[in-house]
Image (cartoon, rainbow, N blue to C red):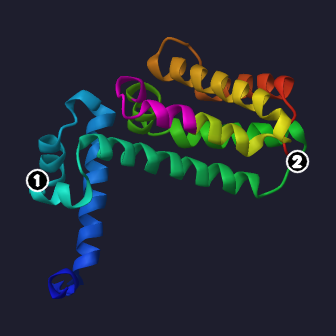
Amino acid sequence: MYATTRSYAGVPADERKADRRERLLDSGLQLMGTDGVHQTTVRNVCAEARLNPRYFYESFTGIDELLVAVFDRLVDEAANKVTAVMAHGADGRDGFVHRVIEAFVESTTADPRVARVLYLESYASEALHPRRFATARHFAYLVAATPEDRLRAEFAAGGLVQLIVGMVSGSLPLTRAELIHRCTELTVATMRVRT
């Protein structure tokens, strides 16, 4: 017990461990978002984080667990931004939908690494497949007006994600602002939303 609570240079062991985990997550994002999931190995992550590989295994059982942790951290950050926008009330249905979609798109595409991980690399990793689908459903349910409207919400969210994939991959020639505008129109036309 003493070894896990001992301070080093005034920093408790738990804080040092948490710091190492954050460094590994940051390195995972850097590698996944630039080189892709298949180039994101334990060795590469540790080299990027400037940590001995033994520290990798104090936080993660393997590379797939790291990939999922990076993905989940990005999703949590986006969800926090969307929820904050939703908490400010509504300025009419269209304005509400626009602000929610704008918060989602901006928070998941402003950093090209984040966009690549969430929208491109998640297709390349079996570990991320379930997370990708669960995430779209989660965001859809945030704006569903009623339980019975969830089907339309999932439809709208799936379409939004697919359009973002097109924008991020370059196959859909839309600017971020154009995508937000078009998706707002389509979402308003498709579903009732909670305002």
Q: Amino acid at mark 2?
A: Asp
Q: Is residue 29 left or right of residue 185?
A: left
Residue 41 drawn at (x, y percent): 18, 38
Residue 9 in view, yes or no:
no
Q: Secondary structure at mark 2?
A: loop
Q: Amino acid at mark 1?
A: Pro
Residue topped by disc 1: 53
> Residue at the spot x=55%, y=13% of the render?
172
Q: What segment is highlighted magenta in the picture?
A: 122-134
- Measured in 3D between alpha carbons, the distance from the residue under mark 1 to the one under mark 2, in whole angstroms, is 51 Å
Residue 57 drawn at (x, y percent): 18, 56
Residue 114, magenta (yes or no):
no
Which disc, if any, is residue 93?
none
Residue 132, magenta (yes or no):
yes
Q: Secondary structure at mark 1?
A: helix
Which disc, if any, is residue 91?
2
| Residue closer to the observer: 7 or 90 | 7
| Residue closer to the observer: 167 or 29 | 29
